Image: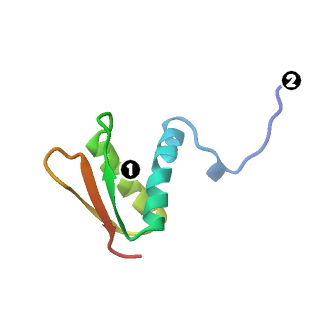
Amino acid sequence: MPKFEALKPEEVQVGRGRATAEARRAFREAIEGSQAGRIVLDRTDRPSTVKRLLAEASKETGIKVRSSWEDKKQMVLYWKRTGI
């Protein structure tokens, strides 16, 4: 017989939400750990995804962040805190 365990809803992430939360962890740590930074993308990274993850991590931490691309190729994203 399977064993069931009660958990709080905020402790459980299912589906795509769990994978996205794992991806945001590095962004949250960067935002909380410094005032500004640079994100260098790999060939497999999508610029829109990286910018979205940065925005979501900013919202989760409650720290406002601004960002801009280094050039039109969108391989380097600069960001900095704008508020707390």
Residue shown at 54% from the left, 41% from the top: 18
Mark 2 or mark 1: whose residue is earlier in sequence = 2
Which residue is label 1 attached to?
53
For residue 82, side relative to residue 56 (left or right) = left
Q: Does 62 sit above or below residue 8?
A: below
Image quadrant containing the N terminus: top right
Q: Which residue is rendered at x = 42% and y = 76% of the image?
A: 84
Residue at image position (31%, 44%) is 41
- Sort mark 2 into few (<14), some (14-19) or many (20+) by Cα contacts within 10 Å: few
Residue 51 drawn at (x, y percent): 31, 51
Q: How far across and down, in percent of the image, does residue 70 sit?
A: 19, 55
CA–CA distance between discs 2 and 1?
40 Å
Q: Nearer the viewer, mark 2 or mark 1?
A: 1
Say whether residue 48 is left or right of residue 21. Answer: left
SS class, disc 1: helix
Horizontal side of residue 39 vs 61, given as left or right: left
Q: Amino acid at mark 2?
A: Met
Q: Residue 1 — which label?
A: 2
Nearest the eye: 33 or 82:
33
Q: Provide residue 64's location: percent of width, then percent of height.
A: 36, 69
Which of these two is toward me, 73 or 56? 73
Residue neighbourhood size for the residue with mark 1, other residues' Cα within 10 Å, grouped as few (<14), some (14–19), many (≥20): many
